[in-house]
Image: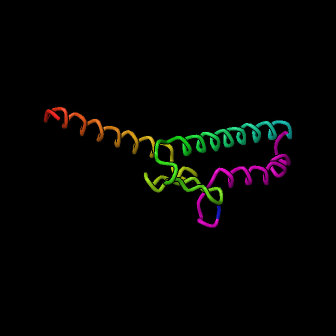
Amino acid sequence: MNEHNTLTIENCIEWLDDRIDRWSQYVDKQCSVRIFQAIRSRLEENQIMRKLLWANHGCPQSAMYGDDGEMQCNACGFDFKRGGMKAFAEKRALENLKRYQEYLRKGDAGE
């Protein structure tokens, strides 16, 4: 956990690195190393995808906060470092539906 008492990918990677030697005492060392490497690789890939999504999610660059390793957006209010990606996808889908409804409403009014 970090100072905000939230779980981040960095925390998970640190936790894995801490425990690989401990696990190796109880299970086959090569097996535990492969398991930990696979988990770590997935966490690192997740981190890369979060950074790409944060940088390209469609809000103005001026609204994005990235100091101190943060990945937040003041325009849409999403925290890309800690927030659930499912929640982000649902929020964006709802916003797109609202925009489409507005588009249809304007079209029906002859505008």
Residue 11 location, x and y as percent? 68, 55
Residue in the image at 43% along x and 51% along y = 76
- In the displayed structure, would residue 89 be above or below residue 19? above
Residue in the image at 62% along x and 54% along y = 8
For the residue pair 35 and 62, the one nearer the viewer reads as 62
Q: Is residue 6 left or right of 21 when viewed as pictured? A: left
Residue 107 location, x and y as percent? 19, 32
Residue 82 location, x and y as percent? 56, 53
Residue in the image at 68% along x and 52% along y = 10
Instruction: Give the quarter of the image for residue 2.
Output: bottom right
The stretch drawn in magenta includes residue 10: yes
Q: Is residue 47 left or right of 37 when viewed as pictured? A: left
The stretch drawn in magenta includes residue 85: no
Residue in the image at 53% along x and 40% along y = 56
Q: Main secondary structure of the magenta part?
A: helix
Give the total of numbered labels. Answer: 0
Q: Is residue 45 left or right of 27 when viewed as pictured? A: left
- Quarter occupied by the N terminus: bottom right
Q: Is residue 46 left or right of 77 when viewed as pictured? A: right
* Residues drawn in magenta: 3-28
- Quarter occupied by the C terminus: top left
Residue 38 location, x and y as percent? 73, 37
